[in-house]
Image (cartoon, helix red, strand yellow):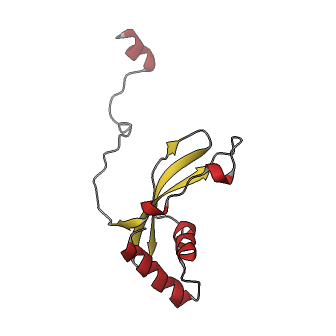
Amino acid sequence: MDQKVFEHVKKFCEAKGYGSDEETVVEVIRETTPVWKDSGDKHRWYILYRKVVVIDGMCIGFLDAECTGDDGTEDSCPFNKKSIREYVAKEKVVTVYEPKPEDAPQKSAEAVVNSI
C-alpha cells in the first residue's frame, strides 16, 4: 500500500475512533462505498474489479475481487494490499449512440432487409 494513502486513512481512522493498524486501514478502504468501479475481469471463482473510493477528500484506487459462488471460498478471492494507491479524478468526454428522433425518416425493418 502506498505510504501516503496509509497515513491519510490512518489519520481518518484515528479521528473516527477506529483502530489505526494496517488491517483496520485496509478494511476501511475496502468497506467504503466506491465512487467508481470498472466492469471487472472475470475468472471462474471471482471477478476482479478496479474500484475507487474517496476518504476524507482523497481518491484511493485498488483491485478487489468479488466471489462468484462457483464452488469457490473466500480464500479464492484474492486481495493485494500493494494495489492500494492514490488516484486522481480526470474528466473525459464519452460518446453515446442513441436512436434518431421520431421526426427523422426511418426505413422499416423489411426495407432494410430487402436492401441488403
Q: Which quadrant of the structure image shows residue 71?
A: top right
Q: In the rendered image of this protein, does residue 49 appear above or below residue 44? A: below
Question: 88 or 111, which is in the foreground?
Answer: 88
x, y percentage for residue 17? 58, 89
Residue drawn at the location 51% of the way across and 70% of the way down? 29
Q: Locate residue 16 relative to residue 52 in the image: left or right.
A: right
Q: In the rendered image of this protein, does residue 3 appear above or below residue 71? A: below
Q: In the rendered image of this protein, does residue 60 appear above or below residue 75? A: below
Count how many numbered circles sit on residues in the image: 0
Q: Which quadrant of the structure image shows residue 19?
A: bottom right
Q: Can see residue 56?
A: no
Q: Locate residue 37 relative to residue 97 in the image: left or right.
A: right
Q: Which quadrant of the structure image shows residue 95?
A: top left
x, y percentage for residue 5? 40, 74
Quarter of the image with the N terminus in it: bottom left
Q: Locate residue 90 relative to residue 77 in the image: left or right.
A: left
Quarter of the image with the C terminus in it: top left
x, y percentage for residue 104? 32, 33
Residue drawn at the location 57% of the way across and 68% of the way down? 31
Residue drawn at the location 39% of the way across and 74% of the way down? 3
Question: 105 or 79, which is in the foreground?
Answer: 79
Q: Can see residue 110?
A: yes
